[in-house]
Amino acid sequence: MKVLVAAKCGFCPGVRNAISMAEKTLKRAPEGQSVYCLGPIIHNKDEVERLRAAGLHTVDSIDKMDSGTVLIRSHGVAPSELSRLKDEGFHIVDATCVLVKRLQQIVQQLEAEGYEVVIIGEENHPEVQGVVGCVNDVVVVADEADLDKLPHNGRLGIVCQTTQSPEHLGRMLDAIARRRFSELKVVNTLCKEAIKRQESAIELCQQVDIMFVLGGLHSANTRRLADLCKKHNEATFHLQNWDELDKKTLFGRKVAGVTAGASTPDWVIEEFVKHLERFGEEQ
């Protein structure tokens, strides 16, 4: 079987930086001192497990941590959580993606200018939750069904979760512009790396018999890649790794395409491609 890999896939610079910082922090930590991560460092269970084996403790609450070092994951946290960590004496290693930091600063500036902040994104995503915690009054809209949340005749300052697609942002802005408002200010906060991965995946999935999108099932950017590919190639499968593959889906296929979300490590991609090529040879 011929296997083609998307030109752009896998770790983005922000995620690669977070993983590198985690590895360095674990190596430098004094013996007996715990190193925590507030929430999974990235949405990939294989990589989280690898770092757990190296000593990184993932917790979902500050209350579950004793003294030690806390790694702030690439999604960032709300300023109130950061302040609490400092007040409680934790050593903080901040691996927040620079684009997420920029987004947090932008919403604070919009609020200071008198705009009612609107975030286009997933309300329960940690990146969005961190951004929400940066301002006093904010509305999160995932799709057009949420637009009734918007205030009438308001001055709206609109931003977007960094990993959303340009197409979704465009559709949402079009829908918002059809409603009542006194002023709209839109700041483009999309991640260019995410867009490159989306464009590369769409291009590749139209050239193959079957398409595989590798990454965590809870990874927003990976789910988005899978959804986009599915629109252009119905034989698209979102898998976390090779172990999840149903080999029956390969029968009758000659060319397979592989891409991966921004939180999928290189070794998962390489292992999947290697097994896929060997499977073809065996058949």
Image: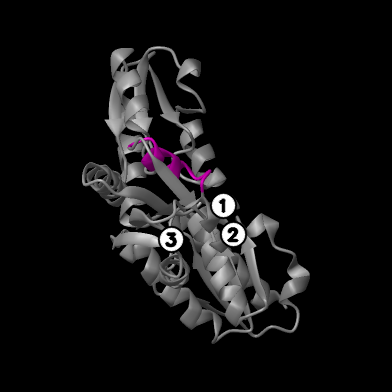
| Mark 1 Cα-neighbour bin, 10 Å: few <14, some 14–19, many ≥20 | many
Q: CA distance from mark 1 to mark 3?
A: 12 Å
Q: Quadrant of the N terminus?
A: bottom right
Name the residue tied to disc 3: 10
For residue 65, above or below residue 254: above
Instruction: Report x, y in % for residue 88.
Output: 33, 12
Asked if residue 190 can be seen in this view, the reply is no
Which residue does the image show at 47% across and 53% down from the upper left?
Answer: 150
Which residue does the image show at 44% across and 61% down from the upper left?
Answer: 164
Residue range highlighted in magenta: 123-134
Which residue does the image show at 41% across and 52% down from the upper left?
Answer: 119
Name the residue tied to disc 2: 145
Check disc 1 and report its element: helix, strand or loop: loop
User: What amino acid type should be assigned to the residue bearing mark 2?
Assistant: Ala
For residue 75, above or below residue 236: above
Instruction: Report x, y in % for residue 250.
Output: 71, 75
Q: Quadrant of the C terminus?
A: bottom right
User: What amino acid type should be assigned to the residue bearing mark 3?
Assistant: Gly
Name the residue tied to disc 1: 216
Check disc 2 and report its element: helix, strand or loop: helix
| Mark 3 Cα-neighbour bin, 10 Å: few <14, some 14–19, many ≥20 | many
Q: Nearer the viewer, residue 218 or 150?
A: 150
Asked if residue 242 can be seen in this view, the reply is yes
Instruction: Report x, y in % for residue 278.
Output: 62, 71
